Image: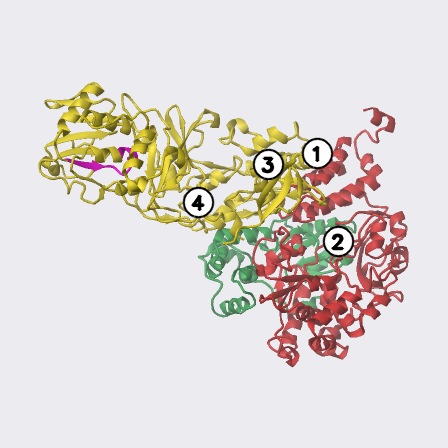
Amino acid sequence: MTPDLVGGLESPDYASHDRAAHEPYAPVFTGEVRRELDELLTHYPTKMAALLPALWIVQRERGWVSEEGMVEVADLLELTPAYVKGVVTFYTMYHQHPVGRYFIQVCTTSPCGICGAEDVLKAFVRHTNTGDLGLTSPDGRFTVIEVECLGACGFATPVMINEEFIESVTPEKVPDILARLA
Amino acid sequence: MAEKKMVNLTIEGRPVSVPDGTTILEAAKTAGILIPHYCYHPGLPIAGVCRMCLVEVEKAPKLAPSCATTVTEGQVVHVYSEKSLDARKGVLEMLLINHPLDCPICDQSGECELQDYTYQEGREDSRYREPKRFNPAEDFGGDVIYVPNRCILCTRCVRFMEDVAHEPTLNVSERGDRALIGKFEGRDMTHPWAANVIDLCPVGALLSKDFLNKARAWELDRASSICPNCTQGCNVIMETRENQIVRMRPRPNEEVNSFFMCDWGRLNYRWMNERNRVELPMVRRGDVFAPTTWEAAITAAARALNGKKVFVAASPMLSNEALFLLTQVMQGGTGAFRVTEGEEAPLAGVDDLALRRERAANVYGAEALGFTKTKDLLGGLKQGDVLVIAGEDLVGIDAGALTRASDIVVISSVLPEVTKSASVVLPIANFSEEEGTVTNLRGRVQRFTQARQAPGETRPSWLVLGDLLGALGKQSNFFLPSDVFARLAATNKSFAGLSYDTLGFKGLPLADAPKTAPKAPVAAGAA
Amino acid sequence: MGYPHHPHQRETTVLSQYFGDAEARTLDGWKKRGGYKALEKALGMAPADIVNIVKESGLRGRGGAGFPTGMKWSFMKPGDGKPHYLCCNADESEPGTFKDRELMRWTPHALVEGCAIGAYAIGAETAYIYIRGEFTEPLYWMDKAVKEAYAAGIIGKNAMGTGKRLDVHVHKGAGAYICGEETALMNSLEGRRGNPRIKPPFPAVSGVFGMPTTINNVETLIASAPILLNGADWYKKMSLSSPKSTGTKLYSVCGNVQRPGNYEVVMGFPFKEFLYDLCGGPPHGRKFKAVIPGGASVPIQTMEEAEATLMDYEGFVAQGSMLGSGGVIVIDDAQSMVSVIARIARFFAHESCAQCTQCREGTAWTTKIMERIRDGQGTHEDMDTLLDIGEQMTGKTICVLSDSCAVPVASGIKKFRAEFEALIPGGRVHPVIAAVA
């Protein structure tokens, strides 16, 4: 998919990671964001059903889902923090730690694996200088992880960078893709 | 409510008839067959996740989880068929591949269902050759420690906190073989009923800090008893090692405490072990108490009481038997008691179950037997009465009030500070050292048995009071506490028709107690 | 050729005809192509009549299980006084499958329409489209299409002016394969861990929020619209293997093949021609070795089996596998089957929800043994152990994830045993010695 297709997609505020990790917690659900949650709640007969969407909002606003964020969501949806944490840890897409400004997910499941996805993954790790999977590059820009089936197996190797989905990536294309990222 | 339709089926060749809606696992129990299981617990909603209780049902394409499969007419169930045994053997092997196999240092050893079923049905060896998963033990707060390496993810603890305590403090974190029981940083297992997860845990994953490394399960002696620490009267097992109570655990009774007991009651057993006891009968000789024989002490006490009006300051920890006999020595006098109070702490998911405000076992029994509940314990003591102090520690009592008594007889386990002026001291067993009955706040009379040996020459309260009655020339030939209870039942209308035999170990309500419904099993109702 | 290429002449493009056609994504563009005519027709019919047409058409669930759609809809009892729900399963996560992704990317309104028809047919006022979180682009287009449809009054309080309420909400998953299992999806939608539920109760009795619920795959719901417009006979007649399998099926083709992509062919199409003709055969200089025809969780086919297959529900079963989700993974002779299978096992170990013992422990154990064999550290006993663990993982758990992990391993050992043995130190055991030992 071409980058302009996702022009309308909101990108998370990844720049705020360090700030979020070190400053006192400021609630996410105030003003417009609170109204967004209130609207979401009208979609479901229970408050609990808004848990996944609410966690998505926290991640969008803060770049990751901190324990404070879990407590805030728990209070709003009348759940306990332990319950929320059980849910957060079930789903792989919620970041429980701050990640790099560009969160790069490379699919290496079998269909992509037999088309050379491992090499694409290695190329990303090498060119981003992150050292290893799951680590963030020293400049805070990149985190690279291996992801299970992205559901675009015919376009091996698909890679997700934040919200952007890039198809048919080969190791040779990796430097260009990274150069394009501001 | 209409009677439920009965369903007939065959389990291991035995005909079984159970109400419609019963699970195969429960139906098998009625045939005397315990289908091995881990995640199922009758007090919790059904999870069906451990897959241990798989049984073969004829004509079904797959093995059925017996905890989650309801009976149907004509069903033929095989618990020990080759297929069922093979499936359970498979589960046991899987449960053990990452288990540290550290039974020798595990508190659960000897009462571990993983051990038991592996011994019963498991493989002799493991085929697992890979490295084991390791997670460090974690203090969950309250009385609870979590050892994840021994955890089989049955989720009983999670379901208890969520569906019974209604406070989801625990969760299943992560997924796949990385999964473990988790809690939230800073939110500890401080719920007043949280320690029940330790009993619910079928393996050594959740342990009691209080009991940690104290004893091996096979060294313990066990006695059926009643928790003496509040008026709920939770049925318990008192466990002792070398004559010391080391643990109290709930004993199921659907009429009283379901499968549970509160943490406060559970951990409040040390007072029964204390060594500050009066161990010998004593009579006053001048300024000091002198040890004497039981005969001499009883005679002295009878002499002190003879022909006098008696005021009894009793403890609501005393049994119905002791309190009844005390009423027989009053000779026109009266009795009173006081009770310590604390905050009420209900268990949300079970009807009418709480740590009660009044923190003594037999408040209702004492009232039913005519003792007055008061804050001013000695208010009813008239000038010239003989004061009998029965089990009361008199802590906080103004010693001045005692001067109204013409004489004082102490019948207690511990000698109260302020009773220097007593003429006779008769040492009696404490709650854990004798047998008897107590009456809970709903008027249910329940038996408790002796868990420990009483120290020194201490005797059971009913025996001492029976002898005293005899010395006073009243009818008394009690050889057993049940004899005292029989007399009580014959004398007191509330107790009419009750006997130790009919009470059994689940108790019965007083004749005039309000009717109560048995507690709905959580398993049936919850989602 | 199938998308992302031009359609091949032997394709029958009913659902995929607008793939690559950007205008079809918009409401106006969709209407210009006949969009929402089926919904309009449906809203003028009695729900039971819609269910009957779908029943008659022979449409079967396209998510993997192949359950007859009309029959599933008929389980929803009208007038029970409870709110009914429709869940659209757009959690497409089965490795090898990416058809729903394209359907939502190119024809988002087709899914809005399918959901509205399905909801109306089962007496539901609310439909949830559960889309996996990784599908950022389908999420974007579906969200946009739903908003457009609301704004145009096609759905909402007064759907198409009929006074009927039809709400459609997009719900974003958060990374869990198992949420494609229908009861796990319902738990996830309710804000829980995506743990599959014990059945019974079945969703039609107690589904999402404890209410009667129907769950359908994206492709299934989208197919309902042309069926309503053109009639059950039209749908049945397209198939070469009617009446058991009817209509067209979208296949996602990936792996070592010249032209990967989505292809829509009628039921009963010969698999050999599909692979060599439509998909262009193996990469230059290579040969096909094996095919996993229905997503990673179905048995592996040898080429002999694959080439003898007619592509429908029964045809794949007859040749040792399953149609599954229609995700065709093609493996050429440059690949090690042991590596491929080890990677599949790792996928399932990663995705196990952790509820059932055999799955939680068995998928991880299987993976460890497979990776050990792959790395040349295996023993002959390992293969027996794998098969035995696989037995323990089959038919004994709440859902079929653990079965899915066992299936490729078992079929791999059975059909490609030599590749396993070649990796075991000491090489292949002489059959006579093995028999004596």
- Whole-angstrom CA distance, mark 2 to mark 3, is 54 Å
**Which numbered disc flags the more N-terminal residue, 4 or 3?**
3
The chain holding disc 3 is B
Residue at x 89%, y 53% (from the top left corner)? C284
Say yes or no: labels 4 and 2 on the same chain.
Answer: no
Say yes or no: labels 2 and 1 on the same chain.
Answer: no
**Which numbered disc flags the more N-terminal residue, 1 or 4?**
1
- Residue C359 is at least partly visible in this image: no
Label of residue B36 in the image: 3
Q: Which residue is label 4 attached to?
A: B189
- Residue B304: where, in percent of width, then height? 13, 27
B444 shown above or below C23: above
- Whole-angstrom CA distance, mark 1 to mark 4, is 42 Å
Marks counted in the figure total 4
Chain C rendering hue: red
Q: Which residue is label 2 attached to?
A: A171
Q: Under tag 2, what secondary structure?
A: helix
* Residue C268 found in image quarter: bottom right
Q: Residue furthest bottom?
A: C161
Chain B rendering hue: yellow
The magenta stretch is B310-322
